[in-house]
Amino acid sequence: MRLKARIIKGLLYRIAVVALAWIVTGCGSKSAPFPTYMQPELLYLKHQPYSHLYVEVDTIEGVEVPDQWLDELKAFLDKYCEKPDGIEIVQDPPVPLSEVKGMPIGAASILCLDGPNTGSGSQPAYLHVFFYDRNIGLKAERGAPHVLSNCPCGILFDTGYFRISKGKAEEFAMKHELGHVLGLCKNPNHGDGVHCKNQGCLMYKDPGLLSSFGLLFGSRVEKQLCADCQKDIETWKSGDIDPKLAFKGPFLIRREDYYSVASLPYCDLIIPNPVESTFEWTKLLSFLKDVIREKCRAALKDGREPRERKWLIRGFWDGSFDKDVSWDSLPEHVIILFRRAADDPSPLIKNYANFALKKLKQEQDK
């Protein structure tokens, strides 16, 4: 069957109607709690349905990632994730700065990633870690390392944020962000949805900044998960995985009635369920990269900066590779799908669907 896909024209800049503060979480003091509709942590913690965890590590030219950071990353995941077929850390060659210069971190992170090696036919759980330095070529309005609640399957790590720590605080921050990936701090008895209330816990608010502050005065406290957080992990492992969630390559799929949402950090696509069950993720990823390059380069050529706060991909994809689709030519089944997605639990998807319906109505009223 021939794949078909559509990305609505103007999508990259006009659909971002929700502020980033809604969707970013991590070490910042004003982070929003992770939503209840997106809880993929058991896909990492349990041995089923994915017995193998594939961690892709990407950097841009000029950013150094010491082996020790990756050793700490693997040791943390080994300790808490049950993966009998192993945890594989794959570090790709640095992406040339010329390919991503001036782009927002969301655009650069997608252009860097390749997705897991699924040549054997077995889909692993997937985690993307993108190291960058906002002082080297990228547009980044948020300095602290962070994950995004729309897709907590990627860590965006600004190494320049820890410039004063001389390389000693990064491992604390890395493990803290891994704690977010594993869903910690949702227990209201000791968490606020993002951070742990127990002082000294690795998941206590802003450990990277506090560690850096302490390191300036010669103090190095080895922060670990508190007993409450460790108990939460063991308790969750006995629970059931949300059947709506699955990985397809690097995409986290959330399956709803009549449609699915395929997500990467900074990217959500509404996909009809028949298409979602058959699409080839490598082709979709390649298509997304083409769209990103075109839109960002066009903006830079015109003297417009593709600012991070406006750079959120929200779109509908039905399988063709048409990049520009007129609103007045959308078939009826797509309009019905937008109406269903207008009640999606994700504010981003809900707002996008309502935007699309409003746009359609404007076209019909002309």
Image (tube, rainbow, N blue to C red):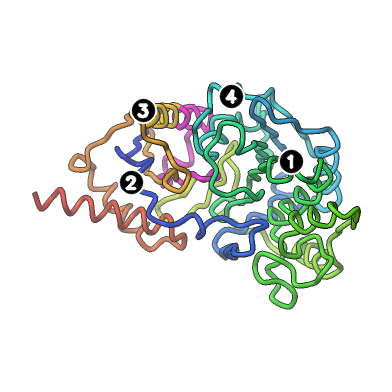
Q: Which mark is residue 298?
A: 3
- Nearer-N-terminus badge (4/3): 4
Q: Which residue is mark 4?
A: 97
Foreground: disc 3 or disc 2: 3
Q: Amino acid at mark 3?
A: Ala
Q: Amino acid at mark 2?
A: Arg
Q: Is residue 262 above or below residue 209?
A: above
Q: Which residue is mark 2?
A: 14
Q: Is residue 304 left or right of residue 288?
A: left
Q: Amino acid at mark 1?
A: Leu
Q: Are circles 4 and 2 on residues that touch, CB within 8 Å?
A: no
Foreground: disc 4 or disc 1: 4
The kind of secondary structure element at disc 1 is strand
- Nearer-N-terminus badge (4/2): 2
- Nearer-N-terminus badge (2/1): 2
- Which corner quadrant of the image does residue 54 belong to? top right
Q: Which residue is mark 1?
A: 53
Decide: few, some or many residues near mark 2? Use Cα within 10 Å; few <14, some 14-19, many ≥20. some
- Which corner quadrant of the image does residue 119 belong to? top right
The kind of secondary structure element at disc 4 is helix
Label 4 – label 2 distance at C-alpha: 27 Å
Decide: few, some or many residues near mark 3? Use Cα within 10 Å; few <14, some 14-19, many ≥20. some
Magenta residues span 263-289
Foreground: disc 2 or disc 1: 2
Q: Residue at x 62, y 59 (%)?
A: 39
User: Is residue 272 a member of the stretch shown in magenta?
Assistant: yes
Image x and y of residue 180, in percent: 69, 56
- Nearer-N-terminus badge (3/2): 2
Label 3 – label 2 distance at C-alpha: 15 Å
